[in-house]
Amino acid sequence: MVSPAQRIRLVRENLALALALWRAAKNGNISPGDLAGQSAEKLDGHGGDGEGGPPPNALDRVQEDGLTRRTGNQVRASFALSVTQTQQSLDLVFTADPLDEEAPDLQAARCAMYLMNKAVAEDMFSPVWECPPRYRRFFQVRPIRFVLDANEIHGRGLNWDHFGGLDKYLYLLDYCEGWAEQAFDRSDGSEPVGEPGSATAAATARTKNSLRGPSLFAGVPGISEVAGGATDSVEAFISTRCKLGEEFRSTAKDLYASYVGWCREAEQKPVTQRSFGMCLTSRGLERRRRGRGKHWWEGIRLAGAPELTIAERRNGVR
């Protein structure tokens, strides 16, 4: 019997492989010629001695750009499959509704998977967020720094940048796998499934340990690359126009306005303010409301920005 955790692992590995193939095709490391002529029979180890010979291989007629497009479609299909299977696996081991989960990080992970599953259920290739009113809130899985802000995405097309990219999503699958494994092992009634306790620490430790060693996801592109490098502009802006440090602060309004101005100068298309914030959050930066109700990003400031006044420092804006 394949356990719920093993099912999550299988679809996670499948998605990681699809991403690796897409990256190889995009970088020119594989070409249609590498795959052409390998019919289904040959790949399976069977000869093509039946009437009419082996069926024609569609890859024989694929151009270089077509291979990138098709491997990209594999990524989309693998993502949808992983969402569906992971949700089914979580439903097998947890009985409570996701929002009723008491462990905060597990609640956030389950709610994120629940919302993704609702999105891909209607259209695998063009999913649209369908967020019930109760779920329109901010979800954060702290051990893996995964965030999904469901406050304003209802009715919008699902974009992987909404939760930090596919690399972050792969970590979420690993986190869910750890919880499913713990819950399944305890499903004999010795401990109520889904309640916080030793499983919380075990699942968190398992996820952290998986991030310490050689990562399956190292170098794997996120949705920003698949979509044409949309969030690359944010990274470039930070590296050229900003300084990072615990002592730095910057207003959210000024920081995003400077980013948009930089994109105009660099002739790049800026991401939305929400996607911009998600990128900053994925880097470990925090957004807080400080003096006079302004929203500030902690840990970053614009290079060359003037020092804050004594009054601003006294009000907690440092």
Image (cartoon, rainbow, N blue to C red):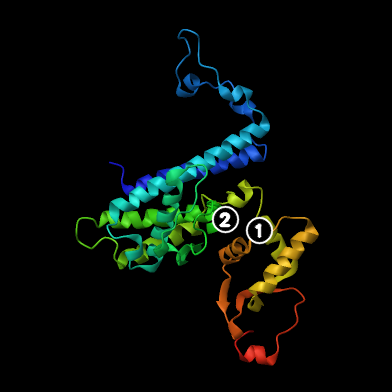
Residue drawn where x is 61% and y is 22% of the image: 60
Where does residue 119 sit, x and y in percent of width and height? 45, 50
Q: Give the percent coordinates (x, y) of residue 94.
A: 29, 57
Q: Secondary structure at mark 1?
A: loop
Find residue 231 and report its image quarter.
bottom right
Q: Residue at x 31, y 52 (%)?
A: 91
Neighbour class for label 2 at 10 Å: few (<14), some, many (≥20)?
Answer: many
What residue is at 39 percent from the left and 68 percent from the top? Answer: 104
Query: Which quadrant holds residue 164?
Result: bottom right
Ranked by sequence position, the earlier of labels 2 and 1 is: 2
Dot 1 alpha-carbon crowd within 10 angstroms: few under 14, some 14 to 19, many 20 or more: many
Residue extending furthest left? Answer: 189
On screen, residue 181 versus residue 298, left or right, reads left
Q: Which mark is residue 67?
A: none
Q: Which residue is mark 1?
A: 271
Query: Amino acid under label 1?
Result: Val
Instruction: Identify the residue under disc 2.
Output: 161
* Marks 2 & 1, CB-CB < 8 Å contact: yes
Outermost residue, right side: 265
- Quadrant location of the N terminus? top left
Q: Is residue 271 shown left or right of residue 196?
A: right
Element class at badge 2: helix
> Which of the two residues, 84 or 52, is positioned nearer the viewer here?
84
Is 26 above or below relative to 53? Answer: below
